[in-house]
Image: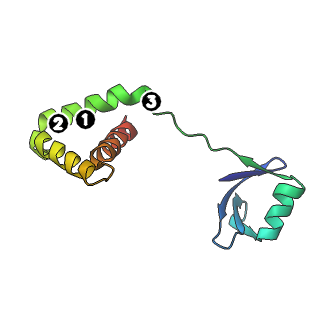
Amino acid sequence: MKIKVDEDVFDVTVQLDGSWKFFWEDEFGKNYHIYQKEQVHKFLVEQKVWEIIPEVKQELAPHYAAAFNMWMQDYMNDPQAYEDSHDSAVRHLKEKLNGEEPSYGAVCQEVLIKYLEEV
């Protein structure tokens, strides 16, 4: 995450013990400072001198068609590399009948995300 302090922005990771590790780079190189959990609460909540900067996620929606077209081209070039639709349907039905969340949708999602990242 990123934290703004006055006009400076720092990369921050939250440690397992609740402390926050601030990273920055200056003329002396890469640096860091760790604030204990109590200090974090003081600066973030009580005094409000730190501001959490919301992360902006890249919008992938406009590229769905291009990603699907890439997948289709790969499928057309090498259909044997993809699972037979009958096998997929049978696995989907077995998982559903066993009370499981069918994995086919999750697999397809990950495949399309890979193509979206290439677009």
Place residue 34 in its image quadrant.
bottom right
Residue 105 occupies quadrant? top left
Front residue (pair 106, 95): 95
Image-quadrant location for residue 15: bottom right
Which residue matches tag 3? 61
In the picture of the structure, the residue carrying the numbered disc 1 is 71
Residue 26 position within the rendered picture, expressed as x and y whole percent measured from the top left:
72, 59
Disc 2 packing (10 Å; few <14; some 14–19; many ≥20): few
Which element type, helix, strand or loop, lies under badge 1? helix
Q: Residues within 10 Å of mark 1 (few under 14, many from 20)?
A: some
Please determine whether, in this image, residue 97 is positioned above or below residue 22.
Answer: above
**Mark 3–mark 1 distance (CA, rounded to whole Å):** 16 Å
User: SS for tag 2?
Assistant: helix
Work out whether residue 82 can be spotted. no
Residue pointed to by mark 2: 75
Distance of label 2 from label 1 (alpha carbons): 6 Å
The type of residue carrying mark 3 is Ala
Please report contact status of discs 3 and 1: CB closer than 8 Å, yes or no.
no
Work out whether 1 lies above or below 109: below
Residue 40 horizontal side relative to residue 116, left or right: right
Q: Earlier in the sequence, mark 3 or mark 1?
A: 3
Q: How many marks?
A: 3
Please, which residue is most extreme toward the left here?
80
Label 2 with label 1: CB-CB less than 8 Å = yes
Amino acid type assigned to the residue bearing label 2 in the image: Tyr
